[in-house]
Image (cartoon, helix red, strand yellow):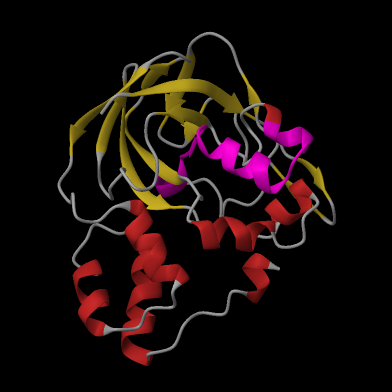
Amino acid sequence: MMASLLAVLTGSVRPLGRTTSGIDKKSVSGPRRVEQMGLVGDSQADRRVHGGIDKAVHCYPWTHYEFWRQRLPGHALLQEPGAFGENLSVEGMDEQGVCIADRLRVGSVVFEVSQGRQPCFKLNLRFGVKDMAAQVQETLRAGWYLRVLEPGVLSAGDRVELLDRPHPEWTIARILTVIRDREVNPAILDPLLHLPLPSSWRRMFERRLHSSEVEDWSRRLG
């Protein structure tokens, strides 16, 4: 994996439309400590859906920004990393090449890929685009979350080293496609449930399997 860390970003909780959010991330210089719950100095507004052990750090590919600049020409947020609330802006990797449970070393920190992002309405508010969250979900350009296996220190410019890939057939893009396409086929969901999924994703796929129904996205996306 020829990947590297372009920028490290943190943010504080601030007003965002009718709510509050820590989505406004800014690049920080120099080494930054990473603990089990994420980057030191970073904040989330609602730990029920953001942050926590399974969503300690959010990664987003810098290469996606060109795609979004073409869709949203001239948008000020797309001139530098942080538009999508990412903690780590990465180069040389994306959802098509990152797999669930990949173990990665960045600086002295060891991470595990825990899940892909399911975008929410706060992206709509941040970008001023009423369906931005839906666009992110539809295009599979959502980024992914990391849990911290070994705390340590990292900084912009560090190499992203792949240590282990136990499930090479299950890329983040493939799993996000199952979610996006409202898949309820047991032949697809059964293998998913054998993966080391976070509890929220396990419950979601189990409900689909047992009810043949898909969760309501209107509140999350709208």
Query: In this orientation, does residue 117 appear?
Result: yes
Image point 21% across, 76% down: which residue?
190
The residue at the far top in this view is 30
Membership of 104 in magenta stretch: no
Image point 19% across, 55% down: which residue?
169
Estimate the x, y position of residue 194 in percent, counting from the top left. 18, 66
Residue stretch in magenta: 53-78
Query: In this orientation, does residue 198 appear?
Result: no
Image point 70% across, 54% down: which residue?
122
- Asked whether, in this view, residue 155 is left or right of residue 41, the answer is left
Q: Quadrant of the N terminus?
A: top left
**Foreground: 106 or 129?**
129
Q: Quadrant of the C terminus?
A: bottom right
Location of residue 95 with respect to 181 vertically, above or below: above
Location of residue 195 with respect to 166 vertically, above or below: below
**Foreground: 3 or 153?**
3
Location of residue 184 with respect to 111 vertically, above or below: below
Membership of 66 in magenta stretch: yes
- Asked whether, in this view, residue 194 is left or right of residue 146, the answer is left
Estimate the x, y position of residue 42 in percent, counting from the top left. 60, 31
Image point 36% across, 20% down: which residue?
152
Estimate the x, y position of residue 15 in percent, counting from the top left. 82, 44
Estimate the x, y position of residue 28 in percent, counting from the top left. 60, 17
